Amino acid sequence: MYRKIFSYVGEYRKQAILSPVTIIGEVAMEVLIPMVMASIIDKGIKAGRIGYVAGMGLLMVVMAIVSLSFGALAGRLSAVAAMGFAKNLRGALFRKVQDFSFANVDKFSTASLTTRLTTDVNNIQNAFMMFIRTAFRAPIMLVCALIAALKMNARLSTVFLCAVPVLLCVVIIIMTKAHPRFKAMLANYDKMNASVQENLTGIRTVKAFVREEYEKKKFTDSTEAVRKAQVNAEKLIIMTMPIMQFVMYSSIISILFFGGRMAVGGEMETGELSSFISYVGQVLMSLMMLSFLFVMFVLSRASLQRIYEVLTEEPDIVSPAENAVTTVADGSVSFRNVSFSYFKDMENLALSGINVDIKSGETIGIIGGTGSSKTSLVQLIPRLYDATDGEVLVGGRNVREYSLDVLRDNVAMVLQKNVLFSGTIRDNLKWGNAEATDEEIEKACKSACAHDFIMDFPNGYDTDLGQGGVNVSGGQKQRICIARALLKKPKIIILDDSTSAVDTATDSNIRKAFREDLADTTTFIIAQRISSVQDADRIIVMDAGKISDIGTHAELLERSEIYREVYESQQKGAEE
């Protein structure tokens, strides 16, 4: 796990290596300064040698400046390395998510992926920066200061050596207990982000139903859950500081007591005692730094596991490893004994026993009640999901044989939820074809009955849509999405209830334009209104995940009870 994640240090490996190297220079100066200070006290001040004091004092200043310079350089190098590492890691996560299928995204949830890309990466960045500084500084300082202290007075060193086992026990206990608590805290972060995401995405619905107070309470509850989880995790961590300080100050008091007696008895020079206390402080401070490093490791370990889960998640829909088909012959589609389950479980099927052959250029209507798996059926064509059993053919080849890019470039799909992005109308339309000319854009928009209302905007096609297309109505958004799909010039186009927000006259005009402009394109129209599909070459009637019947409008009126009931109810509603 660690090797894979830290491999993303990449081009910042140089800074990551140089940072601990410069720390060696900083530590060397810090260890030598107490020796110079002892010499000043014992050989200069006691003997009244003012020149010696001045000279050694100047040397201490130079050493302090050198130490400071090395420390500043180490800090800059570690910051650059840590931020570069975080950039690479975040980029790798984002690219991985782009390769996920719908099923992979469903597994993690959007909110959880957002937390992993932000909070978890930040945790690892901070831990990495601390690691490349503290993980080298603390041990080097500990060893050098310990050797200097032992060399100066081995008997007195036994006092603070007793503190080491105590500090180690504290660190081990904290690491064992804190990890699951931090994992629970991050899970609560996921829930909070989910609440925020839902609220901001559906803010208009919230206001329309006057649910602001409910949403405020819901958000307050989620933030309170995060706070409690944080407190539960952090209350172990905050115990570290008082315990460390207690051990540290107890050691210093003990050394002052015993060392003072030794100095009074002539067994130790005053300068040596002063330097010895400095070394004790360095040793104990190094131990505290190491303990904090372990604490940070506990916090980042939970984040490391969560990120590792995403990086090692294998997309369940990929292009063939070799000999992938790179051309789609035509828009013919065949379902051969297809069954599908979102849970990959043959006991819990969304689609069952689907058999149908569709010729290239046909217009196929799909009708059925809510939950009849109309959308599930068409999502198998561009491999947004894979059939659990059976096979789906496009252009006479199994969809699993195609390169995903080739297949999806030839299958345009306007989803139920129409998604537009920040930018102009033209920018959004060019998602269908980045090289599309103005003439091609206008033609697609005219076919989707979008050109007229676009030109009514002051800036026409250069009108800024705002985030998610907030500046256009639902029907306008649908028509822009249809035009975007048409610009792909696909062999198959799927309209998944994508004219539900337009009036019947506009719906009729769109279908007329499709018949004229897309004569060679296989068209699937999922709709709730019979009028949207009655002119189709054939209509598929779905019921409980199965094909109930297939035929023309007239044929289905005669023999399909489900179709006839829907038609009569809509006709009655229209008359009323």
Image (cartoon, rainbow, N blue to C red):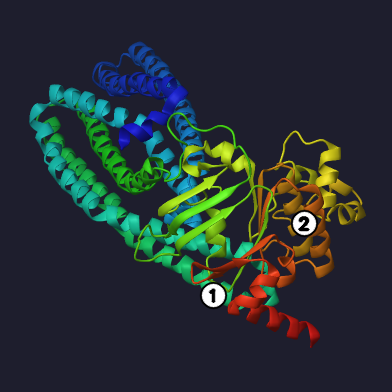
Quadrant the N terminus occupies: top left
- Residue beneath disc 1: 217
Q: Nearer the viewer, residue 458 or 9?
A: 458
The kind of secondary structure element at disc 1 is helix
The kind of residue tagged 1 is Lys
Left or right: 40 as drawn, with respect to 105: left
Q: Residue at position x 74%, y 59% from top?
A: 478
Q: How many marks?
A: 2
Q: Which of 37 and 492 is in front in this view?
A: 492
The kind of secondary structure element at disc 2 is helix
Left or right: 10 as drawn, with respect to 413: left
Q: Residue at position x 82%, y 35% from top?
A: 437
Label 2 Cα crowd, 10 Å radius (few <14 / some 14-19 / many 20+): many
Report x, y in % for residue 25. 35, 18
Q: In which quarter of the image is residue 290?
A: top left
| 311 w.r.t. 479: above or below | above
| 436 w.r.t. 200: above or below | above
Left or right: 40 as drawn, with respect to 403: left
| 80 w.r.t. 442: above or below | above
Q: Residue at position x 58%, y 36% from top?
A: 406
The kind of residue tagged 2 is Arg
Report x, y in % for residue 269. 17, 25
Report x, y in % for residue 458. 92, 51
Quadrant the C terminus occupies: bottom right
- Residue beneath disc 2: 479
Residue 166 is at least partly visible in this image: yes
Q: Which of 314 and 359 is in front in this view?
A: 359
Query: Disc 1 and disc 2: Cα gap in Å?
Result: 37 Å
Q: In which quarter of the image is residue 508?
A: bottom right
Identify the mark nearer the N-term, 1 or 2.
Answer: 1
Residue 471 is at least partly visible in this image: no
